[in-house]
Every structure is written in C-alpha cells, then in structure tokens.
Image (cartoon, rainbow, N blue to C red):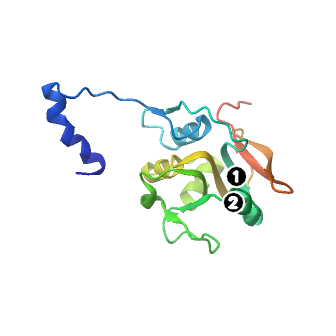
Amino acid sequence: MAGKNIWKFFDPHIKSGLVIEEKSLKSRRCNSTICSFANSIYPSETPITSIMTLNTGHDGVYIIYKDDLEKYIDCYHPTILRYNTKTDCNGYPGYNFGECKGMTFGRILIFPNKMLIKYIVDGTPIDHPEKYYIAITRAKHSVAIVMDSFTPSFQYLSCEISIENGSINGYSYCPDNRI
C-alpha cells in the first residue's frame, strides 16, 4: 500500500484502539509564506501553517524574470520543477510536478504553464490544483517562479533579490499585503 491508500492499513488498528489517529496541518518543511501561497492555490483544502523557524535570508515566494535566470540559478542552485514535459525549461533539466511528490528541496524554481501564469497574473482559479500544491510545498526555503514579464497585483511587492556580486529585480509574494 502506498500513497493515499496507506491509511487503509491503519483503519483496523485505529478502530481497535491500537493506534491513535492524530491529524496535524502544521508543516515542518515549508516556511509560512510558502504555506500561504500553497493555500491560495488550493483554497478548498484546510489551510496548512508552518512551524518552521529557520531564516536563510532568502525565504518565501518570488517572481523572477527569465532574463535573470542564469544568475539566480548560479547563486541559489534551486531544483527545477515544471508541470510536465511540454513546459519549456530553457534547456534546464527538471522534475514534472507529479514526479516530486514526497520529495523535499531547499529551493525550487518553477517554470510555469499557462494555468499557473493566469493564476499569478489575475487570480484565475486553477482547475485541479493538487499537482500545483504538491509542487509548491516541496520547497523548504524559497520558491521562484520564472516569468517573461509581470505586472504585480497587491500581493506581490517589487524587491531586489541578492545574488553573488549584486542583485536582480523581482517580486516577493506578500500574502498579508492589503491596499
């Protein structure tokens, strides 16, 4: 038994009192900004919160420009994720969203498909958000999403992202930012 069916193994043990079931929606893996972004992508699920306290100096969810891709990768060495093999990754190797379930990475870089771009740009809900949620929650410290261009909404603030020997311009996801 694997995946979501693993719970079937525990059912008789829970009913017999041998095992006590305790559910927790607190993430030890992701920081609070990553949890908030994942919750926004999958709003029909019970929200997760973070109990992670580690601060690396580059934590959260960012939009970066494709022109700055090489500099960002050279500095942060993120694991690259994409929805599927049809998603262009500028020649970089990457995992499909479905392949990374159960994995943990320090930092991820997502090459978005059209559905994720529409969600980021104008808030269009994502049909079947499960794979997106799984991909976002693989990162411990940061998620960077590559865009050709971007006009920020109130939830994204312009920022400078520190890299070796300088900085690049990008946007930081700020879930509690209100106009």
Q: Circle 1 is placed at which residue position?
A: 63
Q: Residues within 10 Å of mark 1 (few under 14, many from 20)?
A: many
User: Total label count?
Assistant: 2
Which amino acid, by three-letter code, is at mark 1? Answer: Ile
Instruction: Please report contact status of discs 1 and 2: CB closer than 8 Å, yes or no.
Output: yes
Q: Residue at x 47, y 42 (%)?
A: 42
Q: Quadrant of residue 123?
A: top right
Q: Residue 96 or 165: which is nearer the viewer?
A: 165
Between the C-alphas of marks 1 and 2, the distance is: 7 Å
Q: Quadrant of residue 110?
A: bottom right
Image: 98 above or below 136: below
Q: Circle 2 is placed at which residue position?
A: 147
Q: Residue 23: percent from the left, percent from the top?
A: 35, 29
Q: Residue 36 or 99: which is nearer the viewer?
A: 99
Q: Quadrant of residue 15?
A: top left
Q: Is residue 134 visible?
A: yes
Task: Looking at this view, name the residue that lies furthest to the right.
Answer: 166
Element under disc 1? strand
Q: Is residue 155 left or right of residue 25?
A: right
Q: Is residue 20 left or right of residue 158?
A: left
Q: Residue 176 or 164: which is nearer the viewer?
A: 164
Q: Say which label, 1 or 2, has the lower sequence index.
A: 1
Q: Residue at x 61, y 31 (%)?
A: 53
Element under disc 2? strand
Q: Residue 109: percent from the left, percent from the top?
A: 62, 57
Q: Residue 36: percent from the left, percent from the top?
A: 57, 36
Q: Is residue 47 visible?
A: no
Q: Which mark is residue 150?
A: none
